[in-house]
Amino acid sequence: MSKTLRIGIIGGGGIAGAHVRAYRELADVEIVAVADAVPGKAAQFIDFWQLTTAQAFDDYRQLLELDLDGVSICTPNVAHHRTTVDALLAGKNVMLEKPMSVTLDEAVEMAQTAKKTGFMLNVGFQPRYDPNMKTIQDVVQSGQLGKVYYVETGGGRRRGMPGGTFISKEIAGAGAMADIGCYSLDMALNAMGYPKPLTVSAYSSNFFGTNPLYHKEAARFDVEDFGVAMIRFEGDLVLNFKISWAMHMDTLGPTLFLGTDGGLKVTPAGKGPWSGVFDGSVGSITYFHDVLGHHTESQIPIIEHSKNLFNEKVRDFVEAVRDGKPAPIPGEQIVRNQAVIDGIIRSSLLKREVTIELPN
């Protein structure tokens, strides 16, 4: 008989409910504790989700004193760093919601702590579990495109600005880049084997979020709702990144991989003003190449599936904990994703190109 894994949840907001649903789909997993910094919120969360045997804490450090196999960290972005480091030092495996952190320095410390303690730091990029994302990765890494020298990724919503904690720099750290941009970066960079970023030149704005015509919380909106950047990587590769929560346009275009022998165009799934970004599934994949001197386009069939991508990422984390495997999406890798976002924020503020410094 398998051992029942004991799980704690830190942060009792909306995304934590998705974690509860995912854990409930799995055998031999028990949520034994919930912590939230707002007094009484953890108890309310437990009552709402009928976690009858779970303990409630206002201080997550008390939760970390329990005998736990893992924790899901579902706090606001600014708390990811401290909570993750403390959990790892307390001997807990971590399932962390994206984005990894607010700054690059925080992400580096988190990854180093995981390495030092030997406990898992897994970052929640559920779009990877769409089998079509694996198809993209396989094509790019197969060599069929030749040397890939230019990548364009991002996407945009015609209207799709969230509210609440998402629009406060003090709580979220960043806006559209941290919320949906990190997904687009992961899709492209994971396909490329996560090359090392070197420099960033970026621009960002929040014309829509700060306008009461477009957002009911405009007075407290102080993050970016649009960003664009050119990022240089090792291996003479450049990436054109663009992301938007709101705009007067239907799309910012597909993701493109340009190689010396072929190209790949990927569109996101979904229709309507909240679609247009890679926070879910893939819409189409087209392979451009020459055959005997003729320009040829091959449509790569989309794999239809009924997977709940969010549940898949939680399942993968649980199986890795149970089997003693490495993190499925390791924090050590996602440091480079955070490095790009950190560089975009710095470059936008300074209005010039900045260098990305990563530890060896």
Image: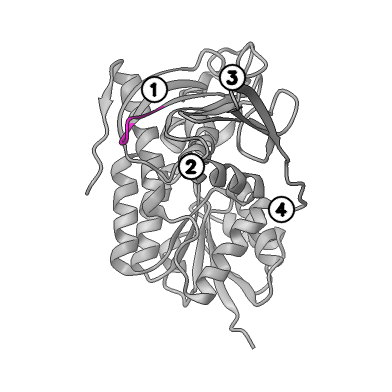
- Give how far apart the Cα atoms at labels 2 and 4 are: 31 Å
Q: In the rendered view, tell whether residue 93 sits above or below residue 137.
A: below
Give me the residue at 46% from left, 36% from top. 172
In this view of the protein, which residue sits in the foreground, 306 or 62?
306
Magenta stretch: includes residue 236? yes
Q: Secondary structure at mark 4?
A: loop
The residue that label 3 is drawn on is 252
Q: Earlier in the sequence, mark 1 or mark 4?
A: 1
2 or 1: tag closer to the N-terminus: 2
Mark 2 vs mark 4: in front: 2
Q: Tell which of 145 and 98 is nearer to you.
A: 145
Question: Over which residues does the magenta segment extend?
Answer: 233-238
- The mark closer to the camera, 3 or 2, is 2
Q: Which residue is mark 1?
A: 230
Give the CA distance from mark 3 to mark 2. 27 Å
Question: Among all residues in the image, which is located at the extreme front?
Answer: 292
Could you say which disc has been placed on residue 143 in the image? 2
Tell me the element at label 1: strand
**For numbered disc 2, what is the local secondary structure?**
loop
Location of mark 4 (residue) = 308
C-alpha distance separating marks 1 and 4: 33 Å
Which residue does the image show at 31% across and 15% down from the upper left? 351
Q: Answer with the quarter of the image where residue 290 lies.
A: top right
Nearer-N-terminus badge (1/3) = 1
x then y, percent, for residue 196: 32, 40
Q: Count residues near mark 3 (Cα–Cα under 10 Å), then give few for <14, some for 14-19, many for 20+.
A: some
Residue 128 within the segment the image draws in magenta? no
Label 3 with label 4: CB-CB less than 8 Å: no
Label 4, residues with CA under 10 Å away: few <14, some 14-19, many ≥20: few
